[in-house]
Amino acid sequence: MDPREALDQIASEVRGCTRCNLHHSRKCSVPGEGPANARILFIGEGPGVNENEQGRPFVGAAGKLLENLLAKAGLRRDEVFICNVVKCRPPGNRDPLPEEMAACGKYLDRQIEAIDPEVIVTLGRFSMGKFLPGARISAIHGQAKVVDGRLVVAMFHPAAALHQPALKPALEQDFANLPRHLMLVSTTVPQTQNTPVGPIHTYHELVHDEPPAEDADPQQLNLF
């Protein structure tokens, strides 16, 4: 099965999924969208009210901000793959529960395997936690880290920047650095998929052999 067929199969399964209680209240599940050969995979937290209506990720105000951020980085939405850690809207936009993330986890793992992205960008602390458990997003946002042979970049969720404007400059800067990550990824990250690379390193350590400056500690909102 080629990557596009694999993604279509996953999407079909997600649309009929009953693995957790979120299917009882959903209108549309949101498998994700984008090209099967995307170099960057963006992973948000969960669908909101607009996504639940349309069955597409990031179509509300946060989606418009995401598209603007991509444009400033010289990227288009149709060049990247966008999905979430949970594929159905948690009622009232509450945080996704551990059992809900676990139920969707295999779908996300299969999407990553099919796309085989060079860079994974996590948007918000729940998607960050899948790759960097125990990390604080305020301390590591924007830093590219090697996790199982891939570059993973944790960023604030666009919805958090909408509700807490002080986060927006950091988010804009983190997006502005994406082209550089892509340009140098082939020389800093082993290309063999799922090959363990030992300790997690920051991109600064890999390229400059020095630690990054300490980040400020703004409050990350539990929004998606």
Image (cartoon, rainbow, N blue to C red):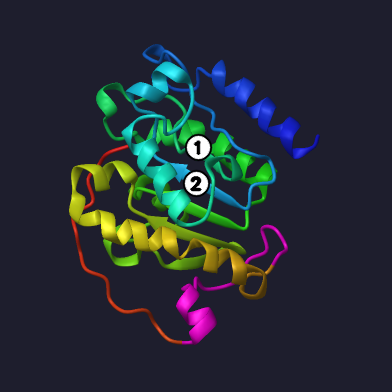
Q: Residue at x 34, y 49 (%)?
A: 125
What is the x, y in percent for residue 150?
A: 59, 61
Q: Viewed as shown, does residue 203 lie left or right of 99?
A: right
Residue 197, magenta (yes or no): yes
Q: Kindly identify which numbered label has been placed on residue 42.
A: 2
- Residue 134 seen by the camera: no
At a point 62% along the width and 58% down the height, the residue shown is 118
The residues bearing labels 2 and 1 have C-alpha atoms spaced at a distance of 6 Å
Using the rendered image of the protein, determine whether residue 18 is visible from the camera's viewpoint: yes
How many numbered discs sit on the rendered protein? 2
Residue 44 location (% of width, % of height): 42, 41
Q: Amino acid under label 2?
A: Phe
- Residue 208, placed above or below residue 26: below
Foreground residue, 50 or 134?
50
Does 53 sit left or right of 37 as displayed?
A: left
Say whether residue 203 is magenta: yes
Front-lying residue, 21 or 9: 9
Q: Could you say which quadrant of the image residue 11 lies in? A: top right
Q: Helix, strand or loop at disc 2?
A: strand
Q: Which residue is mark 1?
A: 83
Magenta span dominant secondary structure: loop
- Closer to the chain start, of discs 2 and 1, is 2
Crowd rating for badge 2 (residues with CA inside 10 Å; few <14, some 14–19, many 20+): many
Specify the quadrant of the image occupied by residue 20.
top left
Q: Amino acid at mark 1?
A: Cys
Q: Which residues are magenta?
A: 191-209
- Relative image position of residue 49 (x, y in whole percent): 33, 22
Q: Are marks 2 and 1 in contact (CB under 8 Å)?
A: yes
Image coordinates of residue 12 in percent, x first then y, are 63, 20
Q: Is residue 33 above or below residue 81?
A: above
Residue farthest toward the bottom in the current orientation of the protein: 209
In front here: 147 or 57? 57
